[in-house]
Image: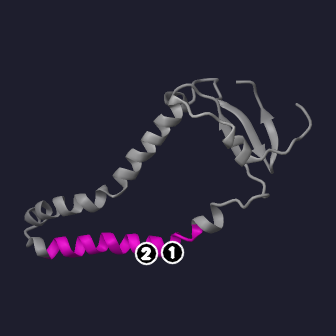
Amino acid sequence: MSAAQTVYVDDLIDRQQLTGRTYLQLGLLLVALLCDGFDLQLVGVAAPWLADAWNLKPSQLVGPVQSANLFGMMLGAIFLGGLGDRLGQIAPGFRADFAAWSIDTPDELGYWIGFNPCSMVVRGGEIALERNA
């Protein structure tokens, strides 16, 4: 292995080209984003059927369930929203730890026997492991 070298993550990312796989990943993230609010919509549809099954009036169930859903989101935003700012960001000049995987298709994310897709590991801003892809 060569001598340790400093890796600037923003430069490394900027040098990458957008490929079909990148657009696939962005598309999957978009689907995840659209599904994120699905629970709020689903409660409004499922609650009347649940009220019927539990012999309640819809007003007895829909209001409290929908309110509990929104209240839980509010508590999560209040108490966990700032956690990402404290733990999830790296200021310029700070060292980052990450691993880069070299795969051709998303199904390769599941490890095959004896196959490790990890092509580079960076620890403390220095390359700790680098394999030819």
Residues 120 and 53: in front is: 120
Q: Is residue 129 left or right of residue 72?
A: right
Q: Callout 2: 10 Å neighbours few (<14), some, many (20+)?
A: few
Q: CA distance from mark 1 to mark 2?
A: 6 Å
Q: Is residue 129 visible?
A: yes
Secondary structure beneath disc 1? helix
Q: Amino acid at mark 1?
A: Phe
In the depicted structure, whether residue 117 falls above or below residue 69: above
Mark identifier at residue 75: 2
Instruction: Answer whether residue 69 is magenta in the image.
Output: yes
Residue at 63%, 24% in the rendered image: 115
Which numbered dot is residue 79?
A: 1
Give the x, y percent position of residue 99: 69, 41
Mark 1 Cα-neighbour bin, 10 Å: few <14, some 14–19, many ≥20: few
Q: Residue at x 78, y 58 (%)?
A: 94
- Look at the numbered discs 1 and 2 and tell me whether their residues touch, using CB distance below 8 Å: yes
Residue at the extreme right of the image, as rendered: 3
x then y, percent, for residue 21: 52, 31
Seen in the picture, residue 23 relative to 31 is either above or below; the reply is above
The answer, for residue 110, to whether it is visible in the render is: no
User: Who's the residue at 61% across and 67% down the image?
Assistant: 85
Quadrant of the image occupied by residue 49 = bottom left
Q: Quadrant of residue 76?
A: bottom left
Q: Which residues are magenta?
A: 60-83
Left or right side of 119 for 19 = left
